[in-house]
Image (cartoon, rainbow, N blue to C red):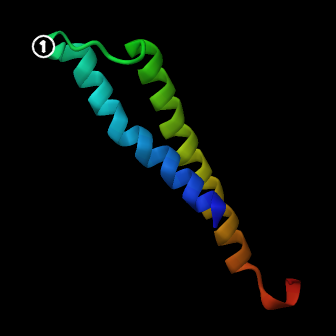
Amino acid sequence: MVGWVGSGSLFAWSAWKLPVTLYMALADPGGVRPPEHPVAAVLLQLAAIAAGAAMLRTLVRIRTRTRTRSPASR
């Protein structure tokens, strides 16, 4: 259960934050400065999205393997 929540939070948090960061970096609205270096923030958010997706993939594989085992092998 913790794995599912962890993968979802990594993916979802960075998935919404990435477009906001890109907008702030590219549009430069009203002289507002981003709170972090834009390139570093984008790289960090892309890595978090990839990590969340990789965790989800691993969890789905594990779940599929345990469900497809025959009752005799348990």
Q: Quadrant of residue 73?
A: bottom right
Q: Nearer the viewer, residue 46 or 5?
A: 5
x, y percent for residue 26: 22, 15
x, y percent for residue 5: 56, 59
Q: In this rendering, would 34 be left or right of 65?
A: left
Q: Which residue shows up at 28% across the image and 30% down it?
A: 20
- Furthest toward the bottom, the residue is 71
- Furthest toward the right, the residue is 73
Rendered position, 18 above or below 38: below
Q: Which residue shows up at 46% across the image and 30% down it?
A: 46
Q: Nearer the viewer, residue 69 or 35?
A: 35
Q: Which residue shows up at 18% across the image and 13% down it?
A: 28
Residue wearing tag 1 = 30
Rendered position, 67 above or below 49: below
Q: Quadrant of residue 41?
A: top left
Crowd band around label 1 with a 10 angstrom C-alpha radius: few (<14), some (14–19), many (20+): few
The amino acid at mark 1 is Gly
x, y percent for residue 58: 65, 54
